[in-house]
Amino acid sequence: MSSLSFWRTYPLLAKNQYRASLRQMKSQQGWFMRIVIALMMVYSAFILLTLGFFFDRFSAELWPGTNPVDVVNRSLLAAFVSLFFIRFLLQKTPRMKIVPYLHLPIGRWTMISFFQSTSLLSIHNFYPLLFFIPFWMRYIVVEGSLTGHSMWIGAVIMLILTSHFANLLLRSILQRRATLFYLLMTLFIATTFVDETAGIGLQQRASEYLFSHILSGDLLSLGLLFMLTAFVMTASTILLFQSINKSEDSARNTRARVRSFEVPSEWGLHGQLVRIELLLMWRNRRPRHYLFVSLLFSTMYLIFMMGSPMAFSGAAFGAILGLFASGGFALNYGQLMFGWDSTHYPAFLSRNVSFQAIVRAKLTVLQLSCLVLFVASLPLFIWLRPNLVPVHFAFLFYNAGVTTVLIMELASRNRQRVDIGKSGGFFNYEGFSAKHWLWFIPTALPPLLFLIVMDGSPRLGLIILAALGFTSLLLTQGWTRYFARGLMARKHRMLEGFQESAR
């Protein structure tokens, strides 16, 4: 069967992807969620436009006496590193969209070029321009040559493209060689930490040198940035081609080869259910990556956050650190606590095991994860921020007692299927919907606002948070019965949702 022509293929793929996006939006989000998301997008766009047009007023408050253009030039690389991390958490790769078309008479390179190109139609690429274009019109165009103006905005666009394709490249590395990915992340965070703590400011100096020279019309600096963009674009495309050529058998062989382990018979049914949950986590790539990345954020990323002299301080900063240092795994993995079982949910329901026993085992895994991450990150708090050790202790109890309960409330209402055999890497958000992202607000905001309000009596605030978490831990049996009743009432709706999302 001959391949479809280039001019017929692209319009067909575009039309099909448009319809798929509409169906996905309608099936996953109701009108209320669409309105909330639309309002958040409009609000974010307004903030970026305002910041771009009136940046001199903001920079005068933070960097008095400094030219706004110099402020932006020295901060561009750091800003796009931050944007890269946001992309890495939220942006999907084209691979999952290509796989359903592999049986069609369409050339592989044709599909790759189409989906690589359409992946650029992302909010992560357009929203930065809402700041940079007004800033360019207001502050760049008024000084220097026309060539420098054009080269500067062109360099910003290339930086956006570099961030976009570097994300695709690193995610491909994560999927194929997870060890290399963790090594690169550790090396990057350690290097940034040394740069900040030593006061070298290499990142700021490199950024200011590069973009000030580009603004002055230096073609060599622009050429270096162009070579970097071309490299990550080419490398990400090649790795994408290699990944879709992997057979399903070889993909299955990447599953962790670990032997089973036994638990003492004295632990009874509860111990066996915890064992099954841990084996599911370790034997499948996607849930296993939640564990590795949680450990990474609770160690190397905390070093960067707490060790930098430019790091934020105050009650809000301490609350964010405390929440993620011991609760990072529960916040991520726990959201899909019942979605992990969606593939075999009919068998899950047919077990001669009560929902109460199942919920108790899952709560135990989440609570123990808080203790494990607490122990892993405690030496960093003692070394870098000993004044935040009480915050770390308070949030151990809060996360184990309150955060896990809030996350379990969300998980017990999941109706989106998660195929852990196919979904591959950690940062594939199959099974997530807008409510999973918005749920972070009622989970993280209350302790943060409470500590801000109690800033005058921080010790009392931490005691109250810890007491609240400890009390909730004592009520674990009551929470178990509550979630079990809810799951029993919703079991048929959850089964229907898992089956519908699999079609």
Image (tube, grey):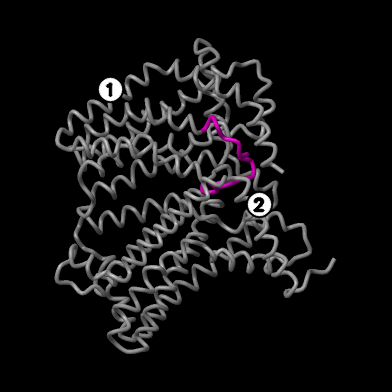
Q: Position of residue 448 (x, y in %)?
A: 29, 39
Which element type, helix, strand or loop, lies under badge 1?
helix
Q: Give the residue at mark 1.
A: 467
Residue that appears at 27% across and 54% down: 193
Q: Nearer the viewer, residue 7 or 423?
A: 7
The residue type indicated by label 2 comes to Arg
Is 143 a magenta residue? no
Which mark is nearer the camera, 2 or 1?
2
Find the residue positioned furthest to the right: 1
Report the magenta stretch's main SS: loop
Question: Residue 150 location, x and y as percent?
Answer: 39, 83
The disc, 2 or 1, on the residue closer to the chain's N-terminal end is: 2
Q: Position of residue 245 (x, y in %)?
A: 68, 58
Question: How far apart are the two marked residues, 2 and 1, measured between alpha carbons?
Answer: 46 Å
Q: Quadrant of residue 15?
A: bottom right
Location of residue 254 in the rendering, given as x and y in whole percent from the top left corner? 60, 44
Q: Position of 140 compared to 41: left or right?
A: left
Q: Nearer the viewer, residue 176 or 112?
A: 112
